[in-house]
Image (tube, grey):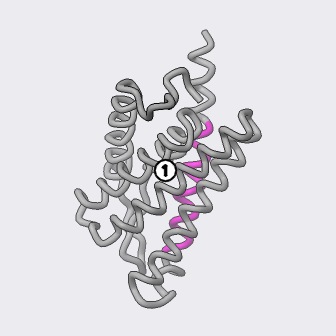
Amino acid sequence: MSDNALTKNGFTTKDLVLCGVLMALTTVMTMIVQIPVVGANGYVNMGDTVVLFSAMYLGRKHGAVIGGVGSALADLISGYGVYAPVTFITKGLEGYVCGLICEKIPNKKGNIIASIVGGAIMVSGYFIGEIFMYGGIKQSIAAAPANTLQALFGIVTSLLIYTGVKKALKK
């Protein structure tokens, strides 16, 4: 957890500003590249990079807020509002659990495990959510490969960015 981690009274002003910036970055990274998924109603994006990085660097509470709010906001702005509730829950859980694992296992191995579990939560969250949204499993199956690729991209890039930021801050 960073020096500006949660205090006993909740988020500090610095935490709120940092969360706001990272929520905005999550929204932008989700919207800047949207590759429609053939056979499904969603799209592949780069937002998971920011969600996973934020959770690894700042912890579970920050990761949950940044992931849930930033990603759902992108859905609302992009015209995918039907996905916003599923996104809010799924990306919030992705950030929360990734951050929690990093807090419990604060080393490189913990980061790898945390990002993989976070990515798996994203894929399974949309899989389950789409079953309820569309009343069947067809859409979920169609979107699963693209969601898996998105998760893999997010895992790799967030680990690279996290490693770079940690090295840069040690200098």
Callout 1 environment at 10 Å: few (<14), some (14 to 19), or many (20+)?
A: many
Residue extent of the magenta highlight: 143-159
Q: Amino acid at mark 1?
A: Asp
The picture places residue 92, in percent across and down from the top left corner, at 47, 55
Looking at the rendering, which quadrant does residue 11 occupy?
top left
Quadrant (top left, top right, bottom left, bottom right) of the C terminus: top right
Asked if the stretch drawn in magenta spans residue 28, the answer is no
Instruction: Kindly identify the residue that appears in the image at 40 percent across and 27 percent down.
Output: 12
The residue at the far right in this view is 109
Main SS of the magenta part reads helix
Above or below, 113 relative to 103: below
| Location of mark 1 (residue) | 48
Instruction: Kindly identify the residue that appears in the image at 73 percent across and 35 percent down.
Output: 108
Looking at the rendering, which quadrant does residue 111 occupy?
top right
Quadrant (top left, top right, bottom left, bottom right) of the N terminus: top right
Instruction: Kindly identify the residue that appears in the image at 62 percent across and 13 percent down.
Output: 170
Is 120 placed left or right of 125 in the picture? right
Above or below, 141 relative to 54: below
Tag 1 secondary structure: helix
